[in-house]
Image (cartoon, helix red, strand yellow):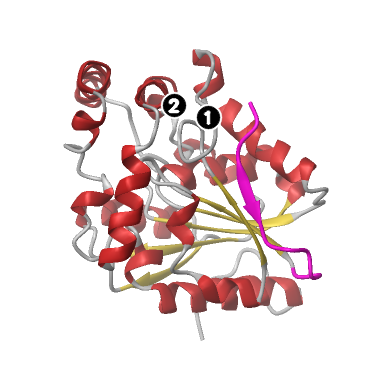
Amino acid sequence: MKLYFEADPDRGQPPLLLVHGLLSSRNHWIPNLQLAKHFRRVRIDLPAHGLSPTPGEPSAATPEAVVKAIDAVRERLQIDKWHICGQSFGAALTLRYALTYPKRVLAQIFTNANGALRADWTQTDDQRNRASIEDIRRNGHAAMRRMTYHPCHAKRFPPDVRDLLSKDADATDATGIALLLEQATPVLSVRARLGDLRTPTLLINGRWENQFQPARNWLSEAHPHIAIIDIEGGHSINIERPQEFDAAVVDFLSARERGPAWQFGTQWQAK
């Protein structure tokens, strides 16, 4: 499965992969224009989103298959190593990518991602997920508009960004979204594997998302080698606070580019 992507011209800047979450698109990163001054941005559309195809079979919707498709983008661009950044569902994929292909990642950043750090997939989780899948298969985009993370419900997005991303969400392929929920969501978590992480990693946490803060606090205690910066905002912190988000990304990845200025295994603080 070939994913659609848009890459900045190669001007010798370090490449930075940007991966959006469910019911969004590559346009999720439009507010983060400052990143283009420092990095060669590669913005992909996940399967069934934007201009990427829908998985042709269930096995193509698993996290492992999507991670493989993401690495195929790197190969098509002839990139040896890149920085990676994921948001929500996309963060679970980029974390998994760094665990799968550690030698291909310079450093990584991720934002609030409940699915990525979930401790257990409970019977209640399974029942809710199955109900969402059945609703989408029956009612399509009307069902997706009832989901809490549909962009139409984003109160802190600039109106133009909310409208654009809502249109993108309404253009997703319902069959593909149901497949991703069925094949990827129950096995999305990488919580048990984070001890194997050897890539310099930063969580940019939107502290206003109460549901995610227990996972953020667990991460801080269990894996102090993963740096954390808290920003006043919610789930989509890169859209809600783009200037602070961009500054944190540039500071962290630039320090990594300098090498000795950032040592893996020590906490990092934004300037």
Check the picture and name the quadrant holding the N terminus.
Answer: top right
Circle 2 crowding by C-alpha within 10 Å: few under 14, some 14–19, many from 20: many
Give the percent coordinates (x, y) of residue 237.
36, 64
Relative to 178, is 6 on the left or the right? right
Q: CA distance from mark 1 to mark 2?
A: 5 Å
Q: Position of residue 41 (x, y in %)?
A: 63, 61
Q: Is residue 204 above or below residue 102?
A: below
Magenta-tinted stretch: 1-13
Query: Circle 1 sits in a helix, a strand or a loop, which is it?
Result: helix
Task: Identify the image quadrant of residue 83.
Answer: bottom right
The amino acid beneath tag 2 is Ala
Going by the numbered disc 1, the residue's amino acid type is: Pro
Q: Which mark, by number, is residue 63?
A: 1
Q: Is residue 59 above or below residue 10?
A: above
| Residue 262 visible in the displayed image | no
Determine which residue is flagged by label 2.
Answer: 184
Q: Nearer the viewer, residue 196 or 148?
A: 148
Residue furthest bottom as drawn:
271
Main SS of the magenta part reads: loop
Query: In the visual, does 133 lie left or right of 257?
Result: left
- Residue 141 is marked as none
Image: 250 above or below 97: below
- Which residue sits at x=48%, y=36%? 192
